[in-house]
Image (tube, rainbow, N blue to C red):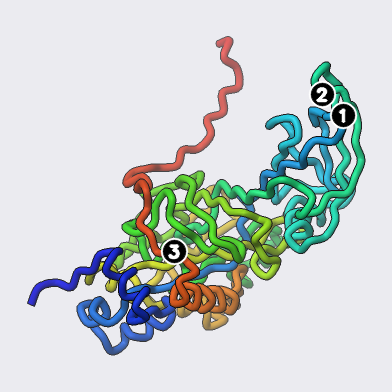
Amino acid sequence: MGETKKSWEEINQKLAAGKAVVLTAEETAELAKTETPEEVAKKVDVVTTGTFGAMCSSGMFINFGHPEPPIRMELITLDGVPVFGGVAAVDAYIGATETHPDDGRFGGAHIIEKLIRGEEVFLKAHAKGTDCYPRRDIETYIHKDRVNEMILTNPRNAYQNYPAATNSTHKTLHTYMGTLLPSFMNVNYSTSGCLSPLLNDPYLRTIGIGSPVFLGGAIGSVAWNGTQFNTEKPVNDRGIPLSNARTLMLVGNAKEMSADWIRAGYYEKYGVTMYVGVGFAIPVLDEDMAYRVMIRNEDIETSLCDYGVDGHPALARVNYRDLMSGTIELRGKRVRTAPLSSYRRARLLAEQLKTMVLQGSFPLTPPARPLPEHSRVQGLSIIRDRRA
């Protein structure tokens, strides 16, 4: 018998006829206990994935519309949070991690969530005034129904994998991986295991520029590879990177999004972040894709890194079954583990996306262009004096 192969068109025809089998990645992982990739490729047509975690590299473009007389906004705040206005006259970019100068617990992510919720936000802007834009100051309240566009534009989301974190020092560390207690007393991790989108398609055969994505409760698109996109990380025998590798730049209409899937957060003594719900529907095109989407938590390893040492060296490999159990063994001791992303919410997202695919409300389309096959991340060179 030849290998099972299905085209995007054939899968879409089955969906339209109501004959397609759509499972979540967690359900497909269960099949791995009893089925072979060949059997899964024949039985399953689409697998839905999901993650809901902190994605600091997020933000939103907003076009306020012109007042009369018009203004070329330069110094802009929303509820007191600085907003970047060096884009155009009444365009601005709200960075999720930008913070209020008097309240480090409140920032851009809170502004984005408030606007998505339909709440009013206080806009204050100053300009130098020009012949074509004579107004110099404006103060008003904005609402999502009274601005032209709110476009979520996230430079780096949905990391393919992320190292777990611990701390060897004798003091508590406050990091983007949460609070790390002294002397290896805890381990934090931040990936949704077998549900994680880019772990189900590790070589991005079905995900690329133009791919539809569940983003914050709406249907968005992959705009480009995310920043710090890295294909050169070590992998395990399943092809899964052992640390932060590929990322995605995502865009979507924030007016259509839901605060169920976009939530502001704050990490103690680190800063503001934003929790984002992201999911993909992956077509099972052949046995290789079946093998990828059958990945189980025990098959997915990540590096456990020491955040108490410069460079965060890896101490060990750990798998997500063990991380999700609540404790792992580290240096002869049982150490507590805790997730920074929500597995429960990831599961709900994958289920919601499954329903959308079956109802025909989420498109299943191939990417317009592939993402890079080879890319690596470089560090910043510090050049102190070019005069030498």
Residue 231 is situated, as x and y percent measured from the top left of the image, at 37, 49
Q: Mark 1 points at which residue?
A: 69
For the point 54% across and 54% down, the residue is 157
Labels 3, 1: front one: 1
Residue 221 is situated, as x and y percent measured from the top left of the image, at 50, 53
**Tag 1–tag 2 contact (CB < 8 Å):** yes
Residue 240 is situated, as x and y percent measured from the top left of the image, at 36, 63
Q: Mark 2 points at which residue?
A: 133
Report the front residue among 159 and 146: 146
- Secondary element type, mark 3: loop
Residues packed near mark 1 inside 10 Å, few (<14), some (14 to 19) or many (20 plus): few
Q: In this view, does 163 lie above or below 155?
A: below
Q: Which amino acid does label 2 sit on?
A: Tyr
Q: In this view, does 217 lie above or below 101?
A: below
Q: Is residue 363 visible?
A: yes
The mark nearer the N terminus, 2 or 3, is: 2
**Tag 2–tag 3 contact (CB < 8 Å):** no
Q: Name the residue under label 3.
A: 363
Image quadrant occupied by the N terminus: bottom left
